Image (tube, rainbow, N blue to C red):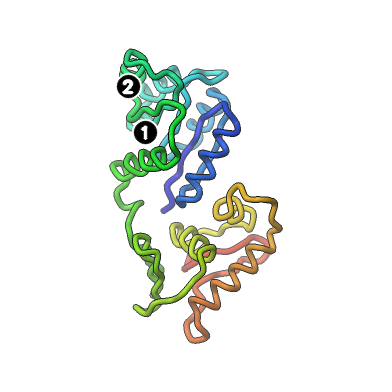
């Protein structure tokens, strides 16, 4: 199952950059730009991890963290705090409210993603499995290779990311818009037909004219892989 991350960041360009980098890693990401909006979202759905800015309009990140730790359903929610406050007293204060990790702005995206992976690994070890398997199709995330019935299959870089995203949630139907957002991210505007073209290439690669088609087209909706 794809790990779900909520990013609560009032700096919209930074929030979009964080979302893009997390989606590029295969995570499902929601974005909130106000603390009260983030709190409302968390009352409806508890994600696998929360990325929380210290200073936010509506409800501050520190106050929201306190509230979340007081609620049984979010008391163990992994939280990474983002802040421009780098003094030791500030870090101690942030950690004392119950955050699991702390990043001082500016920070590198590679470090940020590594911190996210580490927290999710501890919370949900299975979500970062090196091998994704659907029926007789295997995707090796460490080696970036694909196999069908044990035989290597060549797929292009974009088709690999598309396949990985689908295999993280077998049976789930994704719209073309969702696939564009998650696989292509913040790139220039692309038509939804782009997804159809790459799905066609992916099918040709993994089916090879001899294997059953594992990718399901849901008319008027989108695509999924594997059975319901």
Instruction: Point out residue 227 in the picture as x, y percentages from the top left corner.
Output: 47, 68
Q: Residue 173, percent across and down?
A: 55, 59
Quadrant of the rendered structure where residue 119 is? top left
Question: What residue appears at the point 31 percent right and 45 percent down from the top-left corner?
Answer: 121
Of residues 163 and 226, the one drawn nearer to the viewer in this rendering: 163
The correct choice, above or below, for 144 with respect to 149 in the image is above
- Residue 208: image x %, image y %? 50, 82
Q: CA distance from mark 1 to mark 2?
A: 14 Å
User: Could you tell me which secondary element the residue under label 1 belongs to?
Assistant: loop
Earlier-in-chain disc, 1 versus 2: 1
Residue 150, by quadrant, is: bottom left
Look at the picture and state if 13 lies above or below 168.
Answer: above
Q: Nearer the viewer, residue 151 or 103?
A: 103
Determine crowd level at label 1: few under 14, some 14-19, many 20+ residues with C-alpha closer than 10 A: many
Q: Nearer the viewer, mark 1 or mark 2?
A: 2
> Of the numbered discs in the image, which one, if any, rests on residue 77?
1
Residue 47, image x and y in percent?
A: 44, 39
Residue occupying the point 37% across, 60% down: 141
* Picture layout, residue 226 above or below residue 97: below
**Residue positioned most to the bottom:** 210
Residue, x 47% and y 68% (percent of image)?
A: 226
Residue labelled with disc 2: 95
Q: Is residue 196 above or below residue 94?
A: below
Q: Is residue 173 visible?
A: yes
């Amino acid at each position: 199952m794809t790990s779900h991350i909520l990013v609560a960041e009032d700096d919209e360009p930074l929030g979009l950059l964080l979302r893009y980098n997390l989606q590029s890693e295969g995570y499902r990401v929601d974005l909130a730009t106000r603390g009260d909006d983030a709190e409302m979202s968390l009352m409806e759905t508890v994600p696998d991890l929360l990325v929380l800015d210290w200073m936010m309009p509506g409800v501050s990140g520190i106050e929201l963290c306190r509230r979340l730790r007081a609620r049984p359903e979010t008391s163990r929610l992994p939280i990474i705090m983002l802040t421009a406050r780098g003094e030791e007293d500030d870090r101690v204060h942030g950690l004392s409210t119950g955050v699991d990790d702390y990043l001082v702005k500016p920070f590198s995206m590679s470090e940020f993603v590594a911190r996210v992976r580490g927290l999710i690994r501890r919370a949900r070890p299975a979500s970062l499995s090196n091998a994704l398997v659907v029926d007789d199709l295997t995707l090796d995330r460490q080696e970036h290779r694909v196999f069908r019935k044990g035989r290597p299959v060549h797929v292009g870089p974009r088709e690999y990311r598309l396949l990985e995203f689908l295999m993280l949630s077998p049976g789930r139907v994704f719209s073309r818009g969702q696939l564009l957002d998650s696989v292509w991210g913040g790139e220039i505007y692309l038509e939804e037909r782009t997804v159809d073209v790459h799905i066609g290439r992916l099918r040709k690669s993994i089916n090879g004219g001899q294997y059953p088609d594992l990718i399901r087209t849901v008319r008027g909706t989108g695509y999924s892989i594997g059975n319901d």
